[in-house]
Amino acid sequence: MIYVTSDLHGYPVDKFKSMLSSVGFCDDDFLYVLGDVIDRGDDGIKILRLLMSMPNAQLILGNHEAMLLSCDFLFEEITDESIANLNGSKLDIYSTWVANGGQPTVSALKTMRKSEVKYLLEYLSDAPLYDVLTVGERDFILTHSGLGSFDEKKKLSQYSKTDLLWNRPSLNQRYFDDITVIFGHTPTLYYGNEYQGRAIVTDTWIDIDTGAARGLPPMLLRLDDMKEIYFDEEN
């Protein structure tokens, strides 16, 4: 079985493991996480470590992981003093990350050995911006935020990082007629209270960010049968 989730934002790692266990996730299954594992909650780095240990999991880069990577100047020595000495553009980049919920991640990185931080950065640097797959007779594009500046004639490689990491499509946005685009980034409740905690499924795209950043449980979407699996109810 192939599962997709997104925007865990430091969701408690034990609850995340319970999510997977509850669907019988095993070595024969595969998990895609569509970015934003880190920030806001406390367990983002713990979930990253878990994903790094799983040969049957793939992280798609999110804008929060991209903000972490943009602070590569910080990771040679992550201390209160080194942060206090930041200035100019480096301070602006770091401040933007923290303002967007990065402080729990910074705190966790401070406790890690330099070799661990290096390994984690290499893992994030290798994370793709999108993936394309076929499950059964359905074709999918997986990315963090949908496809900004969409043009059906444009190759995926022609989309910018901004298009793939920071896009927020409108409800009437249409993508491909024969390929379903799956993404997170925009909590579904942003489109209206009636969508709170639930995926939004249109005929060309699915938004699976059910609001873990706001304390709501994340979900799993099983691509084999398109089952939406929620964790505030019995499955």
Image: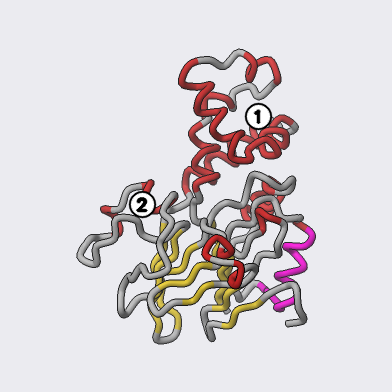
For badge 2, the amino acid type reads Asp
Quadrant including the C terminus: bottom right
Q: Is residue 56 visible?
A: no
Q: On the rendered image, what quadrant is the N terminus found in?
A: bottom right
Which comes before the other along the chain, label 1 or label 2?
A: 1
- Residue annotated with mark 2: 163
The type of residue carrying mark 1 is Lys
Residue under the image location 60 percent in, 79 percent down: 228
Q: Is residue 115 shown above or below 52? A: above
Disc 1 secondary structure class: helix
For the question of whether residue 221 can be seen, the reply is: yes
| Left or right placement of residue 202 versus residue 84 in this view | left
Residue drawn 54% across the image and 44% down it = 65
In percent of width and height, residue 43 lies at 73, 48
Dot 1 and dot 2 residues touching (CB under 8 Å): no
Give me the residue at 32% from left, 48% from top. 160
How many marks do you count on the picture? 2
Where residue 107 appears, x then y in whole percent? 72, 33
Distance of label 1 from label 2 (alpha carbons): 32 Å
Give the camera-side residue of 213 and 127.
Answer: 213
Residue sitting at x 36%, y 51%: 163
Residue 144 location (% of width, % of height)? 47, 57
Q: Which residue is mark 1?
A: 114
Query: Which range of residues does the magenta coloring cover?
Result: 14-26
Please state which of the two labelled residues, at mark 1 or mark 2, is closer to the viewer: 2
Check disc 2 and report its element: helix, strand or loop: helix
Give left or right: position of 125 versus 233. Answer: left
Label 2, residues with CA under 10 Å away: few <14, some 14-19, many ≥20: some
Reply above or below: 121 against 94.
Answer: below
Magenta-span inclusion, residue 160: no
